[in-house]
């Protein structure tokens, strides 16, 4: 672990602008430990990864850069307040990789109004404001993504958040190699709860009409993963679906 | 609240017998706050309720009494250990109404081996061993069930568990009247987290071939409930499906 990997948030003032792909909700969180909780999503544009099965290419691929709006913390907060009617709830900071953006000021502002913040990131970039979060979801990407995990960077994320948020691991599993990766991640970070999530076999394309989700294939993938975990008696792992995909397919904004 | 409503577990020794409908798993918990957690289920036979839409009639209706085995605590524990391979996990005590049976000795025995215990009950019967649980799920039944909640009994369950397990509310919601009931329950017990669960529009019959679950209707019911909660800005409620019904339909033993 190296503290040098943790980036300070030098531009993190109320005047800084963040690159936002979309803000939507309230809907329920469809994934991971907070599944089922009413949530407003703030999705940033831009990512240091290019996963083969990325399901949010519109917030990742630079081709869509002109759809990402620069927004100040104040403007983002105004939209979160409008969508939630001023009633505190959990705000999920997602992406792309939201760790690229300076979120410290938004978290501080929202906390003053009773809102909670969860961040979803692959764990490739650590920021000092991780410690101010309520929940940090670290989702290192398995072999099927085509990405390679920088373990020092992942450790730096855990260190940056130490003493602050609940930290949980979420690993997407498409196949046996991904499952072995998930076990390795859990062995490496034994203190952290693990959620396993079956991959979406029919992710949306970045543009054009979304393919219908193959609900049968999604459910079969989930049943396979439950069997894998219970056969191995890996009882500390939770297995959860992408609930929003079951409910709404690949529809955006829900 | 009346402590007199809390029944002592006079027969609760290792030699007592419990009426067991089925013991199965490990599979994942499909409902409520522990959704996705590997679990072995111990389902008791017998219930003081007769909900119109009961989805476990084989463990409720006295017609099936001859399928319920009297088992000692030691025999139940042996089966839980066999199914879990001796690896600690969460044991869900379910029914029927499992509060009818003397579970104190099983909980004490399992705890010595590192197992955790969750109880699912409508909250009509309070027992002193509730305080030894890890999780108490109180699931008062809404108007569509045809049952009437005894609020003093529900309060007695909370009192019996005080200082012990995490206590969570789970309310099944079929329609607007059920939803209003859920809100009333939450107002009455504001300190407890609430999970809302859409009703299964195609519950299994007690015997004969199970009807195929209408997956479309289940998902539509869930979308309706999410809309209801977010429209009302009831952001402290979680909305979670019956995941096992989505995955396996009405199949038993999963």
Image (cartoon, coloured by chain):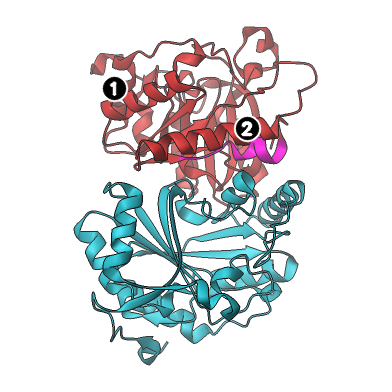
Chain colours: A red, B cyan
Would residue A123 be found to the left or right of residue A58 on screen? left
Image position, residue A222 (x, y; %):
55, 35
Q: Residues within 10 Å of mark 1 (few under 14, many from 20)?
A: some
Q: Residue furthest left?
A: B112
- The numbered disc on residue A155 is 1
- Residue matched to label 2: A218
Would residue A97 be found to the left or right of residue B148 on screen? left
Residue occupying image coordinates x 41% and y 36%: A229
Residue occupying image coordinates x 64% and y 44%: A26
Specify the quadrant of the image occupied by residue A39.
Answer: top right
Specify the quadrant of the image occupied by residue B50.
Answer: bottom right
Q: Is residue B205 visible?
A: yes
Quadrant in which the N terminus of chain B is drawn: bottom left
Q: Which residues are magenta?
A: A239-248
- The numbered disc on residue B72 is none
Q: Is residue B96 visible?
A: no
**Magenta stretch contains residue B217:** no
Q: Nearer the viewer, residue A93 or B239?
A: B239
**Magenta stretch contains residue A244:** yes
Q: Nearer the viewer, residue A160 or B210?
A: B210
Would residue B67 be found to the left or right of residue B18 on screen? right
Residue occupying image coordinates x 33% and y 49%: B84
Image position, residue A63 (x, y; %):
67, 7
Chain ID at mark 2: A
């Amino acid at each position: 672990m190296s503290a040098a990997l943790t980036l300070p948030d030098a531009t993190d003032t109320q005047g800084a602008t963040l690159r936002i792909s979309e803000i939507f909700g309230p809907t329920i969180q469809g994934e991971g430990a907070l599944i089922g909780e009413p949530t407003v999503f703030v999705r940033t544009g831009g990512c240091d990864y290019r996963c083969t099965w990325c399901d949010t290419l519109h917030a990742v691929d630079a081709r869509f850069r002109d759809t990402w709006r620069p927004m100040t913390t104040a403007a983002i907060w105004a939209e979160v307040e409008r969508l939630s009617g001023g009633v505190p709830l959990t705000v999920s900071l997602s992406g792309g990789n939201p760790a690229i953006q300076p979120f410290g000021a938004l978290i501080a502002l929202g906390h003053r109004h009773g809102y909670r913040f969860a961040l979803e990131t692959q764990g490739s970039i650590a920021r000092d404001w991780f410690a101010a979060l309520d929940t940090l979801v670290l989702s290192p990407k398995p072999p099927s993504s085509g990405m390679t995990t920088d373990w020092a960077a992942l450790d730096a994320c855990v260190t940056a958040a130490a003493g602050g948020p609940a930290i949980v691991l979420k690993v997407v599993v498409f196949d046996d190699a991904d499952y072995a990766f998930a076990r390795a991640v859990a062995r490496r970070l034994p203190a952290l709860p693990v959620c396993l999530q079956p991959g979406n076999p029919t992710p949306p394309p970045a543009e054009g009409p979304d393919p219908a989700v193959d609900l049968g294939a999604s459910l079969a993938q989930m049943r396979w993963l439950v069997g894998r975990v219970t056969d191995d008696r890996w009882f500390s792992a939770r297995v959860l679906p992408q609930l929003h995909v079951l409910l709404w397919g690949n529809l955006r904004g829900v």
